[in-house]
Image (cartoon, grey):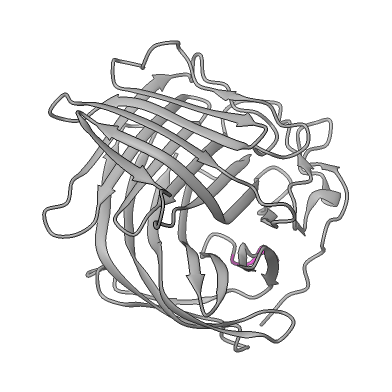
């Protein structure tokens, strides 16, 4: 059943002076309006996750500060049989030299995101995310497992009036998450792997960026689903943003559609169905009490992660594939979704 969620239309502080959740911050907005300055240490989690896709490749960059450590990651996937896949990460104890801003890149009051130290940590990974007048610049450097240099240089555009979905999810006054999800953002640039250059968003090729900006204080363990996709379908530019499990019982959801730059907020939990034993089997995502979402997700690749670093343990199945079905906007427009490229994931986290 859908719940009524308060739409926030003006700037608001996420936290009260004592560091607890500001009740006035609970709700959602079409543009990033929350000021997320957080005091204290121990349960605070901050991250930027960008994923940029083309019909043949994707690259994902993560910068995170989990208080007791920071984790920077570069991931690249080339689609198709025999396609390349590699992931390089750097763990930074206590997050030394990592700086993440309070505001979303591109939002009023935002500042550059720079990840230190000046050279790639442990000779592995360097990620920089910087605002420019024309958009957000994504840069990264690392080495492939066979020691080839990798350089990422992508520019994400923000069309005028393009809306995003920002939501505060409250577990209680001391545990809460501010998430700002941005889909269907045009991107262009290149990724160089050794002597080869892969163009993103070049002539005749579409490239789309998705941002997951997170700031909050989390429980020790959490489970979630996340799905997103971007592209052109049914004569429209469509971004899908879906979440599940972690928001249940909070009165908030992170579910929404972005159609031609306009957000439709979905105030009900989706019915996610998938096989944990076989994540590459088709998934279904539906709104149980309305006809707003009726989609099948067909994966072609599973990015699996199994990590146990003591304080941090993670089990992730992030499947990449295509969405098919239909969606309906809040003004009643029904849109056919055909082969929309994106992902769906099943995650268990102890942190």
Please tell me how many numbered marks the rendered image carries.
0
Nearer to the camera, 133 or 82: 133
Q: Pinpoint residue 314: horizontal percent, then vertical percent.
A: 34, 45
Residue 288: which quarter of the image?
bottom right
Decide: is 347 above or below 22.
Answer: below
Does residue 309 appear left or right of residue 242 in this picture? Answer: left
Does residue 343 appear left or right of residue 98 in this picture? Answer: left
Q: Pinpoint residue 83: horizontal percent, then vertical percent.
A: 17, 51
Quadrant of the drawing holding the N terminus: bottom right
Please say whether residue 218 is visible from this viewpoint: no
Q: Pinpoint residue 205: horizontal percent, then vertical percent.
A: 39, 56
Residue 348: within the magenta? Answer: no
Please say whether residue 196 is visible from this viewpoint: yes
Does residue 12 appear left or right of residue 185 in this picture? Answer: right
Residue 38: which quarter of the image?
top right
**SS assignment for the magenta stretch, majority:** loop
Residue extent of the magenta highlight: 248-252
Nearer to the camera, 228 or 191: 191
Residue 281: which quarter of the image?
bottom left
């Amino acid at each position: 059943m859908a719940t009524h969620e308060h739409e926030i239309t003006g700037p608001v502080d996420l936290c009260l002076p004592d560091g607890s959740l500001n009740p006035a911050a609970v709700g959602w907005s079409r543009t990033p309006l929350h000021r997320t300055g957080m005091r204290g240490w121990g349960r605070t989690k901050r991250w930027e996750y960008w994923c940029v896709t083309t019909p043949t490749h994707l690259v994902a960059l993560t910068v995170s500060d989990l208080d007791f450590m920071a984790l920077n990651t570069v991931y690249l996937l080339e689609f198709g049989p025999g396609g390349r896949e590699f992931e390089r990460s750097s763990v930074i104890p206590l997050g030394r030299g990592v700086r993440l801003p309070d505001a979303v890149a591109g939002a009023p009051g935002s500042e550059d995101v720079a990840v230190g130290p000046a050279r790639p940590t442990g000779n592995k990974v360097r990620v920089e995310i910087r605002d420019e007048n024309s958009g957000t610049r994504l840069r990264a450097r690392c080495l492939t497992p066979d020691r080839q240099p990798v350089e990422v240089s992508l520019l994400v555009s923000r069309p005028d009036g393009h809306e995003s979905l920002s939501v505060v999810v409250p577990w209680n006054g001391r545990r809460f998450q501010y998430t700002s999800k941005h889909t269907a953002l045009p991107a262009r640039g290149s990724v160089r792997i050794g002597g080869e250059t892969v163009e993103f968003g070049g002539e005749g090729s579409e490239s789309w960026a998705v941002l997951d900006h997170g700031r909050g204080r989390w429980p020790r363990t959490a489970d979630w689903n996340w799905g997103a996709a971007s592209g052109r379908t049914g004569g429209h530019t469509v971004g899908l943003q879906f979440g599940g499990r972690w928001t249940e019982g909070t009165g908030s959801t992170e579910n929404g559609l972005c159609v031609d730059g306009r957000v439709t907020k979905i105030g009900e939990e989706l019915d996610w169905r998938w096989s944990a034993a076989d994540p590459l089997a088709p998934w279904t995502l539906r709104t149980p009490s309305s006809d707003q979402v009726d989609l099948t997700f067909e994966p072609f690749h599973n990015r699996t992660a199994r990590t146990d670093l003591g304080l941090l343990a993670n089990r992730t199945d992030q499947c990449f594939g295509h969405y098919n079905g239909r969606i309906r906007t809040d003004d009643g427009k029904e849109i056919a979704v055909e082969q929309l490229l994106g992902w769906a994931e099943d995650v268990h986290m102890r942190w």
